[in-house]
Each structure stands twice: as C-alpha cells, then as structure tokens.
Image (cartoon, grey):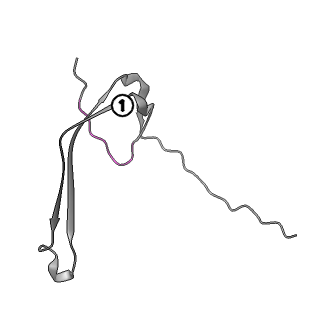
C-alpha cells in the first residue's frame, strides 16, 4: 500500500521517532559553482544537489501538527550580592 502524497507548509511541525525514518539516496551528490551569474556583484553562487527518498518504517511513529503554542520568554531577575 502506497503512502498518500502531501505537501508540507511552513506552519506545520513534524513530531516523531526519527530513528524510524528511512532515507535512501542514489546517484551521489553534486556541487555546482557558478562564478559568472553574479560576477558584477563579486558574488559566487554555489548549488548543492542530492537526490533522496524518504520513507517511514512505522508511519504511526510520526504525526504532524499545525497548532503551535506561543512561547513566551521572560528574563530572570539577577540578584545583587
């Protein structure tokens, strides 16, 4: 049975046991250095490409949530000696 394809948006967090995630890669990686496209700004473009496929060993070990609780930071008062 094939997993349904889905899109992952920026407001979604994935929680799970990532040791149950299987990542397969093929054809190795490639690095392309382009010194010409942004030469007028004295910049170099470096592009890295790696072809991978991701699968779940146990899909029930993962969940996705779009509900994010706000996190508030407060400073801890320093105590004078």
Task: Give the x, y percent position of residue 64.
Answer: 40, 35
Task: Give the x, y percent position of residue 19.
Answer: 42, 31
Query: Left or right: 64 with respect to 44?
Result: right
Which residue is rendered at x = 24% and y = 27% of the image?
A: 4
Which sits in the foreground, 24 or 77?
Answer: 24
Which residue is rendered at x = 27% and y = 39% of the image?
A: 7
- Element carrying mark 1: strand
Relative to 69, say whether 72 is above or below: below
| Crowd tier of the residue under label 1, counting other residues whose Cα lies within 10 Å: few below 14, some 14–19, many 20 or above | some
Residue that label 1 marks: 21
Q: Which quarter of the rendered picture does the C terminus lie within? A: bottom right
Which sits in the foreground, 38 or 13?
Answer: 38
Task: Give the x, y percent position of residue 46.
Answer: 21, 64
Q: Look at the image and give the residue range highlighted in magenta.
A: 5-12
Relative to 76, say whether 41 is above or below: below
Which picture quadrant has residue 66? top left
Which picture quadrant has residue 36? bottom left
Q: Which residue ends up furthest to the front in the rendered image? A: 28
Which sits in the foreground, 57 or 9?
Answer: 57
Which residue is rendered at x = 15% and y = 79% of the image?
A: 39
């Amino acid at each position: 049975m094939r997993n349904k394809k889905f899109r992952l948006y920026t407001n979604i967090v994935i929680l799970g046991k990532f040791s149950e995630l299987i990542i397969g890669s093929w054809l190795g990686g490639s690095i392309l250095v382009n010194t010409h496209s942004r030469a007028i700004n004295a910049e170099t473009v470096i592009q890295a490409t790696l072809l991978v496929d991701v699968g779940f060993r146990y899909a029930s070990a993962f969940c996705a949530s779009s509900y994010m609780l706000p996190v508030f930071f407060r400073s801890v008062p320093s105590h004078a000696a």
